[in-house]
Image: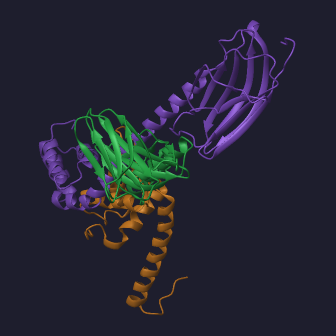
Amino acid sequence: MTMNLLKSDKFINEVISYIKFPFDREDIRKELEDHILDKMEYYDSRGIDKVTAEELTLRDMGNPKEIGIALNREHNFVLGWIYKITNALVTIFLIITVFTVGISLISTIFSGNPAKHISKEDIVYDIKVNEKVKIDDRVIKFKNVIYEKNGDLNIIYEYYDTKPLGMGWSLGSIGTIRDNLGNEYFVSSGSSSGGIVTKGISTISNFSDKIDTLIIEYDMYNRYYKVEIPLKTGDLNE
Amino acid sequence: MKIDKGLVGGSTILLLLSLLQERDRYGYEIIRELETRSDNTFQFKEGTLYPVLHKLENIGYVESYLSKGDAGRERKYYQITKRGKKQLIEEKRQWETFSKSVEKVVYGDDHEFA
Amino acid sequence: MNRKKKIVRNIIILIALSTLFLNRGISLTPMAAHEASERSIHYGPSKVVHIEDFDDGKYILCKYDKWISCNTVKKTMFFFWTFGNQVTGIEIDKGRPLNFTWGYSSDRNKLYGIINDSNINKVELYLDDGRTLSQTEFYDDDMFLFTWKGESKLSEIKAYDSQGNILFKDYK
């Protein structure tokens, strides 16, 4: 308190002693202090000395035990704790949410184009595929197919979970890759990265430029899709 | 004449909500206003106001906030809520009914109001 | 807003945030984690035939269509459950009296399988440290699960009929 008011402090301490929920005590103390200070100013403005003013003020305030018990009834211990705990939980959950969403967003923004390492001069053709398939909660989009002069065929795709903020398994395989003649190809390299949307690239080496159609077929554990991609053959295009 | 019946018994809510209906006030302000307007008829232990205010807040008739206001120091102000305003109308109605009934008993049936 | 209203508001926020997170990697129950794990890896939904605890998780022995699997889920953050590993399984080959597969994760080993020959009434495992494990009561009448801790690995597996004849044998 601003002035040295031992009796007032004693009064308030006694009131506070009846408040069982500890976290409300300081607010109550402040409210009572403000009232007492206001009342003492009132007596002071009527020319009464500080010592008497304090005595009169405390007499006007009433019985500290009565006030304390009545106040305690309005500051329920159980509710108070439930409030405090739910507040803490909300804070924790919000932090986790912001953190998770933040990381997903940042990963998505920074993952960029998986084919950015392929320079334009090396590209024989870049076919836009834009086919979408879905298995369980995963939507997979085959974006484009880039064929390079060195014989590498790159399948660029992306996928996302229809349940956002989901943590789940990455896509293991995009499926079996064949051509229209039935030859099967194996992916020599691949990578994927991303947050909300994962972007991936699968590369097949030594792919012949005579192939008509690329067929990607996923057939595992009763999940199925098939994507057929007509390829350009013959002369080099840009 | 001083009336000290704890906080004037059943009309407490009516009095407090009326004062807060006019403007937001802090505890000491409410006490002063009650005393002034009632020509000091209503005087009671000032500390006992706070349990009532806190109760009104728990019920939802008032809300509190901290503010420096015109009064310099930062104090806890009380503000009437929509629910509080509705309750005030109800309290006023009940008071009118109550006081009319008392009048009828004390002064007899032929005492009419214009 | 008074305290009661704030508590209600907090609970609503907690429920709303939870629905964003629950069953997407973090679940309230082991079964929810198991189901989410299977769906995320595009397998199942399996029929669970047996569940067995280990330190901080559970083995979930399952059947799905023509496959059997033994998924794991792990306890995390005190109250929650999350994906383990080895979610998908092996295809049942009715041509053999018994199908099995085994794997390990740090010092926890598991071996599970299905009995295709109904005459088999005992399956025995011989570990390379000399221990023998056996099972005569099978889950869903035909599945078995052996778990053991330590460095020792499978040496041999044998299956017997009620007369003690060996109907199946396999070496590591």
Image quadrant where residue A113 sits: top right
Colour used to depict chain C in the structure image: green
Q: State which quarter of the image contains the C terminus of chain B.
A: bottom right
The chain whose colour is orange is B
Identify the image quadrant of the N terminus of chain B: bottom left
Residue closer to the observer: C113 or B20: C113
Query: Is residue B108 in view from this perspective?
Result: yes
Up-down relation of residue A157 to residue B73 (above or below): above
Place of residue A41 in the rendered image (x, y in percent of width and height, measured from the top left):
26, 43
In the image, residue C99 lies at what x, y percent? 45, 46
Viewer-closest of C111 and B87: C111
Q: Which residue is at the front of the view, A98 or B7?
A: A98
Extreme residue toward the bottom, this view:
B109
Q: Is residue A2 above or below residue B81?
A: above
Q: Residue at x 69, y 33 (%)?
A: A141
Specify how the rendered protein is coloured. Answer: by chain
Residue located 38% across and 51% down the image:
C144
Which residue: 20% across, 57% down? Answer: A68
Q: Report the front residue among B113 and B49.
A: B49
User: Which color was chain A given?
Assistant: purple
Q: Position of residue C157 (x, y in %)?
A: 34, 43
In this rendering, would C7 be left or right of A196? left
Instruction: Residue C153 in the image: state x and y as whole percent.
Output: 30, 34
